[in-house]
Image: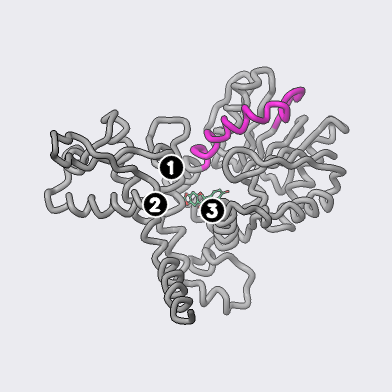
C-alpha cells in the first residue's frame, strides 16, 4: 500500500541518518577495550563483571548495557545465559563474535588501529564543509576545503597523527598474511621487490618472512622511512614515487593507487614500469587494492567498497576502481596484460605485466 511504502521509506531514511551512531558506538567499545576484557576473561562475561573490570561508576552500568545491546544487534557480541539455578533464569553474559575478535589487541588480526584512525575527528569534521565544497570552483578534496591543507600535510605535520595512520596501515597488512598464504605463486621466482608506499614495512616484513631470499625494499616518503633500519634482506629507502622508484624484479602497490586520481596513478604506474624494466618480460607490478564488482550480490561487501570510494574521494581525490577502470589504467600506462583475483577480505590482487 502507499502508506506502507511511506512507512518503510521513513525507516530507511532515518536508519541512514543514524548510521553514525553504530560507528561511534563501535569506536567507544574499541576505546574501552571491551574485546580485550572479554577475551582475557576466557568465558562469557556478565554486565556487572564487565563494568567491574572496566572500573565504571555504578551510574555507567546501564549505559554500558545499552551500548552492548546495540552492538549485539549489529553482530559484535552474542548473549548467553550463565549461572542459571534450577528453575532460575540465570544471568545474561556477553561473548565475542568474529568481528569483535578483530578488536582484540596483540593478535595479528587486530584492526583496532584502523577503527581509531578512520573515526578520528580529522576524518569526520570535514563533512560539515560538504556544501561549500560542492559549490566552490576549485578541484580539491573535501578535507582541503574544510581545513585548508591536504590530508597528507595534516598527517605529516604531527608525529602522533602520522603514526596513527601508519599503525592503521600496518594493522591491515597483518590481514595480508592470510592473503599471502593464498597467493604465494605471485611472489615465487622473484629475486627483488620494492614495496612502494610501504610505510613502516608491515607488508614487506611478512613477504620477507615467507620468502627469506627475496631482497625487499620498503620505499616511502623520507619522513616515514627516515630513521627505520632494515635487516640483511629488508632495507628502507626514502624518496618520491612520482619522481622515480628503485629498480627491482617486482613493484608492490598495496592500498596506494586508490589514494590517487587517474593522472597521478598513471605516473606511479609508469615509474613502476621503469623500475621493473631491468627484468624485461619477467618483471611485474603487483597491485593490491579494491576492485569494485557491481555485479556482486554481496551487498555488505559492495557497500563497504562504495563507502571507501567516498573516503578516498573526500580525503585524497583518490577513488576505488571497477575492473574495467583498472584495465584502462593498466593499458594507458603501457602494460601489455594483467591477471586479477579477489583476495581475503574486500580487496583484489592484480598482477600487471610489461
Ligand atoms: O590508503 C588508505 C587506506 C585506508 C585508509 C586511508 C587510506 O585513509 C582513510 C582512512 O579511513 C584513514 C584515515 C586516518 C587513519 C587511518 C585510515 O585508514 C583509512 O589514521 C588517521 O586518519
Label 1, residues with CA under 10 Å away: few <14, some 14-19, many ≥20? few
Label 2, residues with CA under 10 Å away: few <14, some 14-19, many ≥20? few
Q: Position of residue 286 (x, y in %)?
A: 72, 38
Q: Position of residue 28 (x, y in %)?
A: 32, 51
From mark 1 to mark 2, how far is it between C-alphas? Answer: 10 Å
Q: Is residue 53 magenta?
A: no
Q: Is residue 191 magenta?
A: yes
- Residue found farthest to the front: 87
**Residue positioned 18% across, 38% down in the render:** 49
**Residue positioned 52% across, 63% down in the render:** 143
Give the labeled residue for mark 2: 74
Q: Nearer the viewer, residue 238 or 164?
A: 164
Secondary structure type for disc 3: helix
From mark 3 to mark 1, how far is it between C-alphas? Answer: 14 Å
Query: Considering only order in the chain, which callout, 2 or 3, is on the residue closer to the N terminus?
Result: 2
Q: Which mark is residue 134?
A: none
Q: Which mark is residue 99?
A: 1
Q: Nearer the viewer, residue 147 or 256?
A: 256
Amino acid at each position: 500500500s502507499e502508506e506502507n511504502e511511506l512507512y518503510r521509506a521513513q525507516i530507511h531514511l532515518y536508519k541512514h541518518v543514524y548510521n553514525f551512531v553504530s560507528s561511534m558506538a563501535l569506536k567507544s567499545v574499541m576505546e574501552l577495550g571491551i574485546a580485550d576484557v572479554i577475551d582475557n576473561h576466557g568465558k562469557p562475561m556478565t554486565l556487572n563483571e564487565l563494568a567491574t573490570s572496566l572500573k565504571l561508576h555504578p551510574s555507567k552500568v546501564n549505559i554500558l548495557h545499552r551500548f552492548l545491546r546495540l552492538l549485539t544487534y549489529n553482530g559484535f557480541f552474542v548473549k548467553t545465559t550463565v549461572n542459571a539455578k534450577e528453575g532460575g533464569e540465570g544471568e545474561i553474559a556477553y561473548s565475542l563474535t568474529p568481528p569483535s575478535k578483530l578488536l582484540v589487541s596483540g593478535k595479528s588480526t587486530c584492526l583496532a588501529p584502523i577503527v581509531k584512525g578512520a573515526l578520528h575527528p580529522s576524518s569526520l569534521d570535514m563533512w560539515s564543509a560538504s556544501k561549500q565544497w560542492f559549490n566552490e570552483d576549485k578541484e580539491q578534496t573535501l578535507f582541503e576545503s574544510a581545513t585548508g591543507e591536504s590530508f597528507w600535510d595534516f598527517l605529516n605535520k604531527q608525529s602522533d597523527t602520522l603514526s596513527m595512520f601508519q599503525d592503521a596501515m600496518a594493522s591491515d597488512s597483518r590481514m595480508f598474511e592470510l592473503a599471502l598464504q593464498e597467493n604465494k605463486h605471485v611472489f615465487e621466482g622473484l629475486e627483488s621487490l620494492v614495496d612502494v608506499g610501504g610505510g613502516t614495512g608491515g607488508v614487506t616484513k611478512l613477504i620477507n618472512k615467507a620468502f627469506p631470499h627475496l631482497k625487499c625494499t620498503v620505499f616511502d616518503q623520507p619522513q616515514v622511512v627516515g630513521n627505520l633500519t632494515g635487516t640483511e634482506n629488508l632495507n628502507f629507502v626514502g624518496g618520491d614515487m612520482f619522481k622515480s622508484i628503485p629498480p627491482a624484479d617486482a613493484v608492490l602497490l598495496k592500498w596506494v593507487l586508490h589514494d590517487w586520481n587517474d593522472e597521478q596513478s598513471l605516473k606511479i604506474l609508469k615509474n613502476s614500469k621503469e623500475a621493473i624494466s631491468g627484468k624485461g618480460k619477467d618483471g611485474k607490478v603487483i597491485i593490491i587494492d579494491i576492485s569494485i564488482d557491481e555485479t556482486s550480490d554481496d551487498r555488505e561487501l559492495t557497500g563497504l567498497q562504495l563507502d571507501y570510494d567516498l573516503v578516498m574521494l573526500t580525503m585524497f581525490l583518490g577513488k576505488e576502481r571497477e575492473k574495467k577502470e583498472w584495465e584502462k589504467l593498466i593499458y594507458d600506462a603501457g602494460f601489455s596484460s594483467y591477471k586479477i583475483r579477489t583476495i581475503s577480505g574486500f580487496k583484489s590482487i592484480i598482477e600487471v605485466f610489461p
